[in-house]
Amino acid sequence: GDIVLLAKPVTLTEGDRVTLTTDVPVATDGTSKPEKLLYAVSPPPVHGQIEHINYPGVPISSYSQSDVVAPKVSDVLNNSHGASKESLR
């Protein structure tokens, strides 16, 4: 079926970490198995990274809807490239 993604913008400031919950990204595809949906992080954040909360400091390039529901994924602004703000879209 058609995939519908609902997302709210998230703005981080230096040193911030936001845990992604269904308040930020949530997707449906018209099936009874939304936990099978995968998000691809493309392009990756320039000034931080998306990471699994059990493995801080290790960037990931994809995560599942189940990871969002759990919640097990966060966006971190590490300021490694000299930025004070970043937006996740």
Image (tube, grey):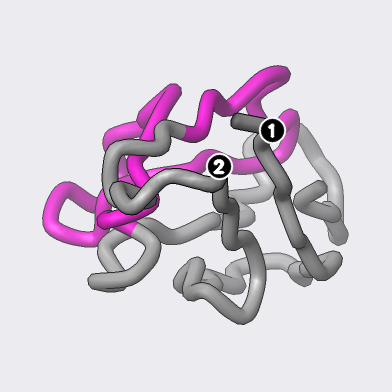
Which mark, by number, is residue 2? Answer: 1
| Residue at image coords 33%, 52% | 32
Indicate whether 19 appears above or below 56. below
Q: Position of residue 65 (x, y in %)?
A: 38, 51
Q: Position of residue 56 (x, y in %)?
A: 25, 52
Question: Label 1: few (<14), some or many (≥20) within 10 Å?
Answer: few
Q: Residue furthest left?
A: 54
Of residues 29 and 74, the one nearer the viewer is 29
Query: Label 1 sits on what residue type?
Result: Asp
Asked if residue 11 can be seen in this view, the reply is no
Kindly identify which residue carries mark 2. 29
- Residue 61 occupies which quadrant of the picture? top left
| Residue at image coords 53%, 56% | 76
- How many discs appear? 2
- Residue 72 occupies which quadrant of the picture? bottom left
The answer to whether residue 53 is magenta is: yes
Q: Position of residue 45 (x, y in %)?
A: 69, 34
